[in-house]
Image (cartoon, coloured by chain):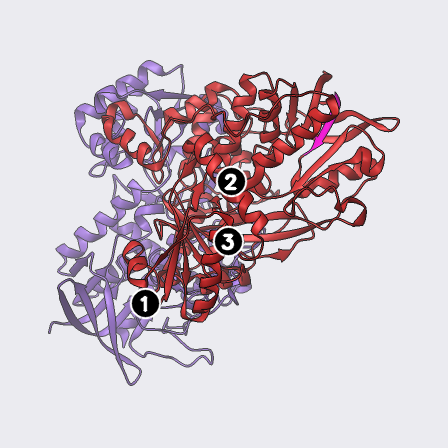
Chain colours: A red, B purple
């Protein structure tokens, strides 16, 4: 099976999906390949913060202006992916009043609404804040669901003819003299290998950019920075809480649905596929963020995770092509003499749309097309539909128990019907895909109970066949889950872990795959 | 203030066994606990040591295990101590609902994940599971009962499975507890037997989730076997455990009938300690806090799940007596890198270290509290989850702790 397209996009993060949508709205055919599921990279491993830009106002006014502009656009085009929580920049005594004054002035210059609050006003809004605060500033921060945002971009593009191939990995770029003419790919589930011919190849792989470029002997200056985050079991605040001090580690708490996300650390990463959250990072985040909300110390954490940010370190040769301090669009034709290949990397979730716009503007210019960008005015397909926590709970309340049917996940109230609907769509290819598309396994037990039930459902639908039965899938899930919970195992989380181990290793006798164990695990 | 011969703290299998042993010795006993213990979560059969291969004689297997694991709780009780305690346990469950080993060693029973699992003493309602042959077995699940996935079990056991609909009972209320209560009703189990019979295609064995009633599981079993003409067995599944709850209720009723004071839902919140002896405990029943005293005390509060141990961010503590706890190193080393690490996670070795009489000791081996004995999974140097030794440790050390406590 060989395929052909005008533009081949590599990478199913926010940038790739954004480019696919932008191209589709301008009538240019494209195809996107992603080696995992959507948002497998940094797009799915961040704090889910809808930046107001205030964080950059003092240190990087240009980035601040970009952020507030995109913030306003996203509220318009993707209201269903956003919880407009507002945000506070909180000054502790050690942060001092000087930075706060600079901060308010800089926000004004960047066009960010910044409302100064007295300690009493701030504590009335967020009672769990440290009572020693000396002041706060309210800014238009919010929370965004990155997975939903990316899937919505993809859905819109798909309805306009774009094809998306997930779990499909690029194994090589096809070279035709000094041109890149497409890519060789492999389906990671079936193993099938084939070629995709394209006039343009867009490398939107973020931190993986050099992996693709290395296939044709190219390289850009990219440093990798690991950022770790913790997820609490409850929602600590209504608003995003930031420390009002120069940007540093451990300075933000973002509410997300029923939980909060504590961030972030910043450590150099060497390996893109294998990195963990260290005990030191966890201790640091808990200590540091308990200064802002003292209750953080006693809070139960359900999971830790890390993402790898691509940080640009462009050399002299390509500096002029960096169109913003935050991200870079590199045309390897003019930069390296290899035509038909463009890399877009750096940046942040907040600017994904702008990055896509600049990329497609460039392609249009090279194609000689004069079609304006529409992504900042055309709303995403689901805009107008409610999907927030409040709507989910209201929906459940309105239903009678009989109509609600079977609830698979008791922590997050995911009905069996929601999973059935996703399976009916026929796009998911493995267990993790289902977990990405529902709130299954995102609650307190992190899937300890509902995954057993989900596997029953998969078996019933004969979806788990061909992989040696679902206990292979179950083992795989438990290992994946382990990466997230192992760093936060103390207190109540550790109690829960004893329960889960007692079920799967004790009661069900699932063992490491080793021959000769009594009972042998599998019958 | 009421005065007892022995106060047992913890109402799991080790505490129940200790209280029962003491009551049988004529002691005046108080048993107090926060909840029903791990018994009602995972207690199905009585594991002794799953590590012993099924073809090996259990006494031989454990004797050589003790030789290789001198710090293990079984090294404190010895094989003879285990055997005495087990005989005592079995005596508490006379037929028809009795527990027995099916041979001289472990037997393999099917689980709710479709795996086979080694165990030792098996209740009569599960015994046929060890004899079943996949082609002649039918696995029966219930539509809407999500904690037993019959399709998963039958797929892995390579036998046939069916899901029965119980339309008149709805989907919402279909929990293990609800099913077990329904099974206690003769009309329900008779109708169920008929529904199963209609689905059969010559099978000689029928596997059901472990929900065959609270009151008379052996009668439920007999009814189903008579109607279907096949041998029926229960399959252990996700918590809560109905078979474990049966064990709990049986102990509780027996203890109360023999005059023990049984306090449920009341955690022992404080212990009064003076000159190396416990002089009383405070039991919280808000707004009341009542003090109780005894000559001896048995600490059987379980591990993390039971509340016997608590993991602070940097170390493991025992919250009631603040006993020295064997530590598994710094937090980063508590757990292995993989969930299914070939070796058990180091934290499972954490717990209370004791002398030969099960009295808690410090790092130097000095007894910390003269009149406190420690029993059950809170003890250090076992790996009950991996070894499959949970109930064996509970019963053997609970029995020994009571004997030693009353010998003072």
Q: Is residue B130 magenta?
A: no
Stretch of the chain drawn in magenta:
A197-203
| Mark 1 neighbour density, 10 Å: few (under 14) some (14–19) many (20 or more) | many
Q: Classify residue A388 by image quadrant.
A: top left
Whether tag 1 and tag 2 are in contact, CB under 8 A, the answer is no
Q: Classify residue B127 by image quadrant.
A: top left
Q: Which residue is mark 3?
A: A55
Q: Please state if A28 lies on the left or on the right of A69 as rendered.
A: right
**Residue A249 image label:** none
Q: Which residue is mark 1?
A: B401
Q: Quadrant of the N terminus of chain A?
A: top right
**Predominant secondary structure, magenta span:** strand
Is residue B216 shown above or below A279? above
Pick the front one: B59 or B355: B355
Q: Which residue is mark 2?
A: A69
Disc 3 to disc 2, how far (Cα)? 14 Å
> Same chain for marks 3 and 1?
no
**SS for callout 2:** helix
Q: Residue at x 49, y 28 (%)?
A: B157
């Amino acid at each position: 099976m060989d395929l052909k397209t005008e533009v081949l996009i590599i990478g199913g993060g926010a940038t790739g999906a954004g480019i696919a949508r932008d191209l589709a709205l301008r009538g240019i055919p494209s195809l996107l390949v992603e080696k995992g599921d959507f948002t497998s990279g940094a797009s799915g491993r961040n704090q889910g913060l809808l930046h107001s830009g205030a964080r950059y106002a003092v240190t990087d006014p240009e980035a601040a202006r970009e952020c507030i502009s995109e913030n306003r656009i996203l509220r318009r085009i993707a209201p269903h992916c956003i919880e407009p929580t507002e945000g506070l920049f909180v000054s502790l005594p050690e942060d001092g009043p000087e930075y706060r004054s600079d901060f308010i002035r800089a926000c004004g210059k960047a066009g960010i609404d910044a409302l100064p609050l007295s300690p009493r006003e701030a504590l009335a809004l967020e009672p769990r804040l440290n009572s020693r605060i000396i002041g706060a500033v309210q800014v238009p921060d919010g929370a965004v669901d990155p997975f939903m945002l990316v899937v919505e971009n993809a859905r819109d593009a798909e309805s306009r003819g774009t094809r998306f191939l997930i779990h499909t990995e690029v194994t090589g770029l096809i070279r035709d003299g000094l041109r890149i003419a497409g890519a060789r790919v492999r389906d990671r589930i079936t193993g099938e290998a084939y070629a995709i011919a394209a006039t343009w190849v867009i490398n939107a792989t973020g931190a993986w950019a050099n992996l693709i470029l290395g296939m044709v002997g190219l390289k850009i200056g990219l440093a990798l920075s690991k950022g770790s985050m913790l997820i609490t079991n409850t929602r600590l605040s209504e608003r995003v809480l930031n420390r009002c001090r120069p940007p540093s580690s451990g300075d933000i708490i973002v509410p997300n649905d029923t939980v909060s996300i504590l961030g972030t650390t910043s450590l150099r990463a060497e390996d893109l596929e294998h990195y963990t959250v260290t005990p030191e990072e966890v201790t640091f985040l808990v200590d540091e963020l308990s200064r802002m909300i003292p209750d953080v110390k006693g809070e139960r954490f359900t999971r830790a995770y890390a993402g790898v940010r691509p940080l640009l370190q462009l050399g002299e040769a390509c500096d002029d092509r960096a169109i913003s301090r935050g991200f870079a669009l590199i045309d390897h034709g003019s930069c390296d003499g290899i035509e038909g290949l463009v890399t877009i990397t750096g940046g942040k979730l907040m600017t994904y749309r702008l990055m896509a716009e600049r990329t497609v503007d460039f392609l249009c210019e090279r194609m000689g097309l004069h079609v304006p960008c529409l992504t900042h005015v055309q709303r995403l397909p689901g805009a107008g539909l409610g999907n927030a926590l409040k709507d989910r709970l209201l929906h459940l309340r309105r239903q009678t128990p009989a109509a609600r049917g079977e609830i698979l996940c008791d922590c997050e109230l995911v009905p069996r019907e929601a999973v059935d609907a996703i399976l009916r769509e026929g796009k998911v290819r493995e267990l993790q895909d289902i977990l990405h598309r529902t709130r299954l396994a995102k609650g307190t037990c992190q899937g300890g109970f509902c995954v057993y039930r989900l596997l029953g459902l998969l078996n019933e639908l004969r979806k788990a066949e061909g992989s040696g039965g679902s206990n292979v899938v179950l083992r795989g899930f438990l290992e994946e889950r382990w990466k997230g919970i192992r760093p936060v195992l103390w207190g109540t989380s550790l109690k829960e872990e004893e329960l889960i181990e007692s079920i799967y290793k004790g009661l069900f006798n699932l063992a490491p795959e080793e021959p000769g164990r009594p009972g042998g695990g599998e019958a | 203030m009421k005065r007892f011969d022995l106060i047992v703290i913890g109402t799991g299998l080790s505490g129940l066994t200790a209280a029962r042993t003491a009551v049988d010795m004529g002691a005046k006993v108080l048993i107090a606990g926060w909840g029903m213990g791990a018994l009602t979560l995972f207690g199905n059969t009585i594991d002794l040591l799953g590590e012993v291969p099924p073809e090996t004689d259990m006494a031989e297997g454990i004797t050589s295990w003790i030789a290789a694991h001198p710090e293990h709780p079984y090294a404190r009780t010895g094989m003879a101590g285990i055997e005495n305690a087990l005989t005592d346990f079995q005596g508490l469950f006379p037929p028809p609902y009795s527990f027995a080993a099916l041979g001289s060693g472990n037997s393999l029973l099917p689980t709710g994940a479709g795996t086979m699992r080694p165990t030792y003493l098996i209740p009569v309602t599960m015994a046929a599971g060890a004899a079943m042959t996949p082609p002649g077995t039918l696995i029966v699940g219930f539509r809407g009962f999500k904690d037993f996935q019959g399709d998963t079990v039958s797929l892995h056991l390579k036998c046939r499975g069916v899901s029965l609909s119980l339309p008149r009972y709805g989907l919402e209320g279909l929990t293990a507890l609800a099913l077990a209560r329904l099974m206690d009703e003769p009309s329900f189990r008779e109708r169920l037997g008929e529904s199963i019979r209609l689905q059969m295609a010559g099978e000689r064995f029928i596997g059901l989730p472990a929900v065959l009633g609270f009151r008379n599981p052996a009668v439920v079993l007999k009814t189903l076997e008579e109607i279907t003409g096949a041998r029926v067995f229960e399959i252990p599944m996700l918590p809560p455990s109905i078979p474990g709850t049966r064990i709990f209720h049986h102990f509780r009723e027996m203890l109360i009938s023999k005059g023990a004071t049984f306090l449920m839902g009341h955690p022992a919140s404080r212990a009064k300690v003076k000159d190396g002896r416990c002089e009383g405990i405070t039991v919280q029943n808000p707004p009341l806090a009542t003090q109780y005293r005894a000559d001896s005390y048995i600490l059987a509060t379980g591990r993390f799940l039971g509340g016997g141990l608590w993991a602070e961010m940097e170390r493991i503590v025992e919250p009631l007596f603040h006993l020295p706890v064997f530590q598994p190193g710094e937090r980063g080393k508590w757990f292995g890198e993989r969930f299914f690490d070939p070796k058990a996670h180091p934290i499972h070795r954490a717990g209370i270290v004791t002398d030969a009489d099960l009295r808690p000791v410090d790092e130097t081996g000095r007894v910390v509290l003269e009149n406190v004995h420690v029993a059950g999974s809170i003890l250090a140097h076992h790996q009950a989850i991996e070894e499959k030794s949970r109930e064996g440790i509970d019963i053997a050390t609970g029995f020994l702790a009571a004997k030693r406590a009353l010998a003072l």
